[in-house]
Amino acid sequence: MYESYWQLKQKPFDNGADPRFYYPGESHQAALLKLRYAVENHRGGALLAGASGTGKTLVVGMIRQVLAEQFSPQVHLVFPQMPCAELLAYLADELEGTATAPPTPGLPVPSLQATIHRIQRLLAENTRQRRHAVVIVDEAHLLRDVETLEAMRLLLNFQSAGRPDLTLVLCGQPGILPTLQRTPQLDERLGVKCLLSPLSETETARYVHHRLQVAGAKREIIEPGAIPTLYALTHGIARQINRLCDLSLLIGFAEERQTITAAHFESVCQELVAVVPE
């Protein structure tokens, strides 16, 4: 809607996982390096934790993009909060490349024992073909069921020649940390742990500049003096930065502004972002 007004090729602050918009913040780069190390060195488990909106999904997307072809199949479970038998059956289908959609609740699923044997066979064959599977469990903080957590741990027991047949990456909000503390048998199998931090004020400025440049900005749109206010309002959380900047560009277009100022950020935040019931 506002792209042509600001002379942009596309919206710069969408919350999608387009790798072109990835900004290499310090904690994000550290997480990317650690996770890549874990996968490429066939470590069994890894953890990526971070508050909502800090960029976990984008880091996961970058990992999947930079890994070489032999690190496959890459399975991304985005809805893990399902019964253990259904979750593992869906995982088996994904590993085999036959999954079309998450299982429909209520439909019969194979027995847990049959599914585990199937996963074991698929992983062993995958390793024989000189590949290494990667299983990413998104929203892993929702895994509270003891049976499901135990199943995640048992996946790490599948090995060939003393090395794991897959790397399991648990990706979730910090609420997963106390859960892991109560499940030491799984926690101790996670050889790499990463915690994403919010962007600093300096990184916020660079993040905004980067996304505008990728979107095709040819001139100054957000005044440099507005960045401290943007940072104070969003606390360096990428998703909040995206939302406030996107709405500010929209209202700026409607009001025919030439640039986005600190006062504009404050006004938009008060009127459209920080809405509370009366």
Image (cartoon, rainbow, N blue to C red):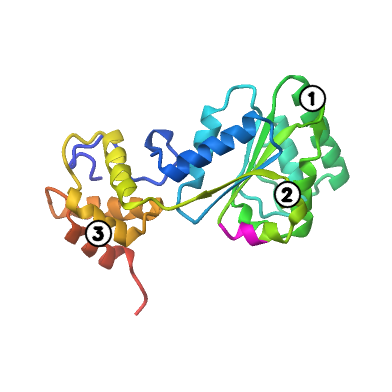
Residue 229 circle label: 3
What is the spatial separation of the Cα atoms under label 3 and label 2, in whole angstroms? 42 Å
Q: Quadrant of the C terminus?
A: bottom left
In the image, residue 56 sits, relative to residue 24, either above or below, namely: below
Q: Main secondary structure of the magenta part?
A: helix
The reply to whether callout 3 and callout 1 are in contact (CB within 8 Å) is no
What is the spatial separation of the Cα atoms under label 2 and label 1, in whole angstroms? 27 Å
Q: Amino acid at mark 2?
A: Glu
Question: For residue 154, what is the image quadrant?
Answer: top right
Return the x and y of residue 167 as percentages of the image width and height.
Answer: 68, 36
Q: Residue at x 23, y 59 (%)?
A: 265
Q: Earlier in the sequence, mark 2 or mark 1?
A: 1
Q: Earlier in the sequence, mark 3 or mark 1?
A: 1
Q: Amino acid at mark 1?
A: Glu
Decide if residue 215 is on the left or right side of residue 16.
left
Residue 223 circle label: none
Please identify the residue farthest to the top as the structure is shown.
Answer: 129
| Part of the protein shown in magenta | 174-178
Nearest the viewer among 15 and 131 is: 131
Say few, some or many: other residues with alpha carbon within 10 Å of mark 3 (under 14 / 14 to 19 / 20 or more).
some
From the image, tell me which residue sits under label 2.
Answer: 188
The reply to whether callout 3 and callout 2 are in contact (CB within 8 Å) is no
Considering the numbered disc 2 on the image, is that residue within a helix, a strand or a loop? Answer: loop
Q: Amino acid at mark 3?
A: Thr
Q: Residue at x 36, y 59 (%)?
A: 235
Return the x and y of residue 57 as percentages of the image width and height.
Answer: 51, 44
Q: Earlier in the sequence, mark 3 or mark 2?
A: 2
Return the x and y of residue 232 as percentages of the image width and height.
Answer: 30, 61
Say few, some or many: other residues with alpha carbon within 10 Å of mark 2 (under 14 / 14 to 19 / 20 or more).
few
Q: Residue at x 83, y 41 (%)?
A: 116
From the image, tell me which residue sits under label 1.
Answer: 125
